Amino acid sequence: GQQVQQSPASLVLQEGENAELQCNFSTSLNSMQWFYQRPGGSLVSLFYNPSGTKHSGRLTSTTVIKERRSSLHISSSQTTDSGTYLCALETGANTGKLTFGHGTILRVHP
Amino acid sequence: DMKVTQMPRYLIKRMGENVLLECGQDMSHETMYWYRQDPGLGLQLIYISYDVDSNSEGDIPKGYRVSRKKREHFSLILDSAKTNQTSVYFCASSPYEQYFGPGTRLTVL
């Protein structure tokens, strides 16, 4: 089965609402990274978060290793937050190989 | 400012032609990667390079080869391109966190 599962697959919000994106993995992890991708664009790293909680502006990432999950919280969403959010984990020790989830497509309406 | 560059950004080739995709980084990262992204399949790792002339197959290496003669440059080569290699190709580099280039959209007719 798929090692990395993201939910929901898609999400529609009104501007100002909060969002909680989930990433669950079926194997132990070495590192976890969250990316943002605009349609037709490249991947922008949001967080490198192997464990614990990290903050960046309106974004918060929390990884709980023993529960094999990571979440991305977006507060006070804006239309410019629309796009695809991808989580990826490195499972092999120091291989650098990331396994990606299929992403959550977020649309924020004004 | 950390930067990964890719050339060309768009490329159209005919089946059977050779393709060269170039990637550069100015951060002296040892590790570099080539991925392809396809609808429904997500991002898949083609090759990983741990340093000059130290390359390793990823999950889908068939039909591709790579070259890394300088730490800052990593090339992806398609010998005799096939139509199913039409995709968006991303290069990345990392010390630990991965930084991605803007991508190359390749169409093989």
Image (cartoon, rainbow, N blue to C red):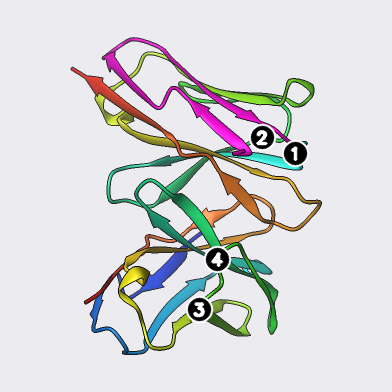
For the residues beneath circles 3 and 1, the answer to whether they share a chain is no
Q: Alpha carbon of mark 1 to alpha carbon of mark 2: how far?
A: 11 Å
Q: Position of residue B56 (x, y in %)?
A: 68, 73
Amino acid beneath label 2: Asn
Residue located at (49% from left, 74% from top): B24
Mark 2 belongs to chain: A
Numbered disc in front, either 1 or 2: 1
Image-quadrant location for residue B6: bottom left
Numbered disc in front, either 3 or 1: 3
Q: Which residue is mark 3?
A: B64
Numbered disc in front, either 1 or 4: 4
Residue interval drawn in magenta:
A1-27
Please tell me whether residue A20 belongs to the stretch shown in magenta.
yes
Q: Identify the mark at residue A49; answer none if there is no mark.
A: 2
Q: Are marks 3 and 4 in contact (CB under 8 Å)?
A: yes
Answer whether residue B1 is visible to the viewer in this image. no
Q: Which residue is mark 1?
A: A29
Please tell me whether residue A48 belongs to the stretch shown in magenta.
no
Mark 1 belongs to chain: A
Amino acid beneath label 4: Ile
Q: Alpha carbon of mark 4 to alpha carbon of mark 2: how far?
A: 27 Å
Q: Which residue is mark 4?
A: B60
